Image (spheres, rainbow, N blue to C red):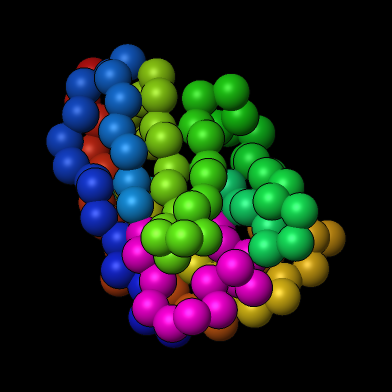
Amino acid sequence: VELVSSGGGLAQAGSSLTLSCVASGRTFSSYTMAWFRQPPGKEREFVAAVSWSAGSTYYADSVKGRFTISRDNAKNTVYLQLNSLKPEDTAVYYCAAELLGSESRVWFDGNYEYWGQGTQVTVSS
């Protein structure tokens, strides 16, 4: 599976961006999809995930209520809508995929077999 993400850029605090991640292959619906991010000088952290089975969504506390993850299985695409952006949202955002992923540990990056190349989001104050 190849993941190609896009949609990052420079944004002002309070504004919005939409990230997209397109997956190759025919079994996209069988993958739990997630977004992680790596702020400058920090470790990678979980942002959001959407399960393959029930389409359940999960969010880090830091983005809950501001970001929305969704998937379109017909387009092999997962989205991350970023609203009310803050300077601390500045990071490289990565999409990730886990085949038949368990919903119990969606936050654990070690579970994900495939990763996108990352897209930079920079939020100015």
Tell me the magenta residue range: 21-34
Of residues 114 and 62, the one nearer the viewer is 114
Q: Position of residue 56 (x, y in %)?
A: 72, 47
**Relative horizontal placement of residue 50, taking residue 42 as reference (left or right):** right
Of residues 12 and 103, the one nearer the viewer is 103
Q: Is residue 65 above or below residue 72?
A: above
The answer to whether residue 85 shows anywhere in this view is yes
Identity of the residue drawn at 72% across and 71% down: 101
Q: How many marks?
A: 0
Identity of the residue drawn at 35% across and 65% down: 22
The residue most toward the left is 10
The answer to whether residue 94 shows anywhere in this view is no
Q: Is residue 89 above or below residue 19?
A: above
Q: Position of residue 33 (x, y in %)?
A: 56, 62
**Relative horizontal placement of residue 62, taking residue 24 as reference (left or right):** right
Q: Position of residue 117 (x, y in %)?
A: 30, 70
Identity of the residue drawn at 25% across and 55% down: 6
Q: Is residue 21 above or below residue 17?
A: below
Residue 25 is a magenta residue:
yes
The residue most toward the front is 74
